[in-house]
Image (cartoon, rainbow, N blue to C red):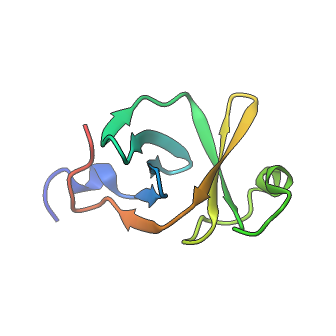
Amino acid sequence: MEAGDDDHRGEQLYVTFSKEYLVRGRACVRIRDRPTGRWGPVLPNRVLGSVPRDEPDAEFVCDLGVGKPRVGERLCIQVGGERVVSTPILAIEPIAGRAAPD
């Protein structure tokens, strides 16, 4: 393990069609717009869990914080008083051992 690898232990990159969500623990710390490649700031938030792809009542299931997000499901994030549900997750990549965005 190289110096600095511990800084990114537990970080995951959730990739959807148009966004990449960099998650550390239960917080989304960065969001990248895939078409432009730009990383943007994020508001204080909490990752609640995932929503199954075919769940018609996403906001209700989002409240339950059902499990760790998996490919095919949608990421559910609490931002202030609102819940944000992503499009389906295409890939999940660990950050440990590779350069994280600045």
The percent coordinates of residue 83 (x first, y second) are 72, 40
Q: Which residue lies furthest to the front in this view?
A: 35
Does 92 sit above or below residue 3? below
Does 68 sit above or below residue 47? below
Front residue of 32 and 34: 34
Q: Quadrant of residue 96?
A: bottom left
Split into 4 quadrants, where in the image is the C terminus?
Answer: top left
Split into 4 quadrants, where in the image is the N terminus?
Answer: bottom left
Residue lying at 21% horizontally and 59% vertically, measured from the top left: 98
Q: Which residue lies furthest to the left in this view?
A: 2
Residue lying at 13% horizontally and 60% vertically, measured from the top left: 2
The percent coordinates of residue 88 (x first, y second) are 59, 62
The percent coordinates of residue 76 (x first, y second) are 66, 51
Q: Quadrant of residue 32?
A: top left
Residue lying at 61% horizontally and 65% vertically, measured from the top left: 68
Does 70 sit above or below residue 34? below
Residue lying at 23% horizontally and 56% vertically, measured from the top left: 5
Number of marks drawn: 0
Q: In this view, does 30 lie to the left or right of 28?
A: left
The percent coordinates of residue 35 (x first, y second) are 36, 46
Front residue of 16 and 61: 16
